[in-house]
Image (spheres, rainbow, N blue to C red):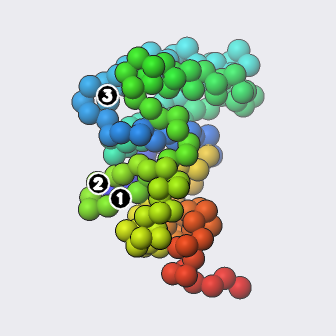
Amino acid sequence: MNPPPMILPEFEDDAPIWLYGFRDPLDASGRALVREAFTDFLPTWVAHENPVTGSFALLEDRFLLLCGTVEGGFSGCSVDSTTRILKDLRARSHLDALDRGLVFYRKDGAILAVSRSEFASRLSRGEVNAATRVFDLTATRLGVLRRNALERPLRESWHAKAFPSAAPALPASN
């Protein structure tokens, strides 16, 4: 299931976004902890001393979408402050959304998260292939997420280049 085309409708397509995938699915308690942490954080979010207009959404009980706009643009410190919230959630509640080495994919309706090396092994064993639906967390603008979706076949995402063993199933490019 992809996010609705108008997810976070209060923001324009060019609004910056950050996507994080949780290692494990969020249960009701985990969802509540993430919502509480970001609901408390958003009113305090600043960049270059300017308040950020921000929002978030939890997608598929597995992904955090964070979106914001600020006059003058974002600073490294303003982005780091969001990472501190996620580090705190990991330390307090073992909710880990900071492992960028994970590959998220759908199998039999469930979303799985595995290391890149394990994903490559599953490709070589034929457990996943170019048609496997993967989750692409690389979008940096809300409009990209709205148009291209979070979930799509491996052959249509960055995963196709990262995992050359899927390449035989891909059409040749000119």
* Tag 3: amino acid: Gly
In 3D space, how far apart are the residues under numbered discs 1 and 3 (Cα atoms)? 21 Å
For this rendering, which residue is in front, 5 or 104?
104
Q: In the rendered image, which residue does mark 2 sit on?
A: 110
Instruction: Determine the secondary structure under disc 2.
Output: strand
Q: Residue at coordinates 51% horizontally, 81% vertically from top-left?
A: 169
For marks 3 and 2 on the same chain, the one whose residue lies earlier in the sequence: 3
Q: Are marks 1 and 2 in contact (CB under 8 Å)?
A: yes
In 3D space, how far apart are the residues under numbered discs 1 and 2 (Cα atoms)? 5 Å
In 3D space, how far apart are the residues under numbered discs 3 and 2 (Cα atoms)? 18 Å
Instruction: Determine the secondary structure under disc 3.
Output: helix
Is residue 11 visible in the rendered structure shown here? no
* Tag 1: amino acid: Arg
Q: In the rendered image, which residue does mark 1 sit on?
A: 106
Q: Where residue 122 sits: x, y (%)? A: 43, 64
The image quarter containing residue 36 is top left
Mark 1, other Cα within 10 Å: few <14 / some 14–19 / many ≥20? some
* Tag 2: amino acid: Ala
> In which quadrant is the N terminus drawn?
bottom left
Does residue 8 sit above or below 156 in this rendering? above
Does residue 135 sit above or below 169 in this rendering? above
The image quarter containing residue 29 is top left
For this rendering, which residue is in front, 93 or 86?
93
> In which quadrant is the C terminus drawn?
bottom right
Q: Residue at coordinates 64% horizontally, 28% vertically from top-left?
A: 79
Q: In the rendered image, which residue does mark 3 sit on?
A: 30
For marks 1 and 3 on the same chain, the one whose residue lies earlier in the sequence: 3
Mark 2, other Cα within 10 Å: few <14 / some 14–19 / many ≥20? few
Is residue 174 visible in the rendered structure shown here? yes
Q: Residue at coordinates 42% horizontally, 38% vertically from top-left?
A: 22
